[in-house]
Image (spheres, coloured by chain):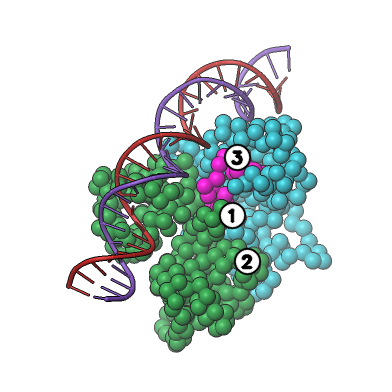
Chain colours: A green, B cyan, C purple, D red
Amino acid sequence: MQSLTATRAVLTNPAGHMAIRMPQRPARGSVNQIDLIGTEVAFAKNGQFYCEGEPSTYLYKIVTGMARSYRMTAEGRRHIVAFYVPGDLFGFETGNTHTLCAEAVTDARVRVMKRASILNRATEDFDVAEQLWLSASGEIRRNQEHILQFGSRSARARVASFLLEMVRRIPSGNAVALSISRQDIADYLDLRIETVSRAATRLARLGAIAISSNRKITVRNSVVLTQLLK
Amino acid sequence: MQSLTATRAVLTNPAGHMAIRMPQRPARGSVNQIDLIGTEVAFAKNGQFYCEGEPSTYLYKIVTGMARSYRMTAEGRRHIVAFYVPGDLFGFETGNTHTLCAEAVTDARVRVMKRASILNRATEDFDVAEQLWLSASGEIRRNQEHILQFGSRSARARVASFLLEMVRRIPSGNAVALSISRQDIADYLDLRIETVSRAATRLARLGAIAISSNRKITVRNSVVLTQLLK
DNA sequence: CGAGGATTTGATACCTGTCAATGAAGGTGG
DNA sequence: CCACCTTCATTGACAGGTATCAAATCCTCG
């Protein structure tokens, strides 16, 4: 597991940072049992957790930072299936190989756990089983909402929906999309980057959001933003 | 559980059929333990399993027939999130209420299981835990593929993709989409019914499929169909 | 055989993708 | 600390595909 992670990070990390193994923290008061399984690992921005076709042995839980899972099409287009924020568990697979790739959007720390370990612990500990249930159900829920996000919606509505989703999932006031590029947003919403840009500009003109810098968008009026969803 | 299911069927079943409780089958040779939990119930076509906002107490496993989960928008549009075929488990929720509605596409038999029962059994029995894992991962996988199905794809590619998906998931030769209406397909692929119709007609003209009747489409040339995915 | 719904087909408008060019931001080295 | 350079984001013009509206035809079921 160490060799796998280290190799991957070295091979795929554009920033050239090694994955740094963090010391495992001791159990404390109300720590979830599931957070004691596996090892916490640091990944640099754009570092790759795994990629399509590779053996799927581990599950990943975001501690800090953000991740994205995606697939490249034959035409070289990237489709982002999901973003993961602290607390999210990802890497679920039915078979023995990954069907998607996953990367760090920002510098991130993740807890890497063996699938077999988790299943075994779930069999022994009801709390672990329930945490696993909640994590899997959460992934299902988010995927379903993502599917609904496409439903007959204009580019403006999709961008508005995305911003509201991020504000909800990242508890950091109303400033969102930090470190998420326009390209990431476009690949997530199935739009071109130009279309995302135009939609964001229009939302800003309407006063619903404020674009302070390229990577920082602030939701000024979530009521207006919600009305624009349809 | 009996009253809930029966009431639901009576209230929501357009065909006016009661949900019929089936006798629980005894355990046999290699029967999965998870298939011994809960009760098998029959639903008539278009009968409703549950709907958005209702308490989520049960999980559902398709035995025969087909189901769909969906949500209605404020504008009265229906968006189908998923289709379920025999073997699929659905109804996963993080909270105590359903976030989607689910109905029978055809007359169907489903095994209805209490969520709490499954979690308890998973804690006792490794096989149940693993089955639960595989079912949840399968749902995640299908949702992810559905998301990717939208990715920058033409109407023709979406319909082709949908037909290939159904041929793969329903092991019944190459005749698919039985009892799935054009409207269902449209609401699943986020297209208008007219667009689905046009795309299907074009695929038929290309010889990739054959439209014998409204509800019966046969895949004649899956190679050609696969080439049309891009 | 008849009636109502579902599907197909046609004409047109609108939105987004594409191509192209400009402008802004962030990172590096002198 | 500034200039340069690379990457990213914005803006514009135009073409193409799908939604929309309308109407004809086909199926299905009573």
Coordinates of residue A75 in the picture (x, y in percent):
56, 52
The one of B9 and B167 positioned closer to us in this rendering: B167
Magenta-tinted stretch: B143-163
The one of D20 and C23 positioned closer to us in this rendering: C23
Q: Amino acid at mark 2?
A: Gly
Coordinates of residue A30 in the picture (x, y in percent):
42, 80
Identify the residue shown where x is 30% and y is 51%: A222
- Whether residue B204 is situated above or below residue B36 in the rendered picture: above
Q: Chain of mark 1?
A: A
Q: Choose mark 1 or mark 3, whichever is in front.
A: 1
Q: Identify residue for label 1.
A: A74
Q: Identify residue for label 3.
A: B156
Q: What distance separates the C-alpha of mark 2 from that of mark 3?
A: 28 Å
Identify the residue shown where x is 47% and y is 64%: A68
Confirm whether residue B103 shows in the render: no
Q: Amino acid at mark 1?
A: Ala
Q: Identify residue for label 2.
A: A53
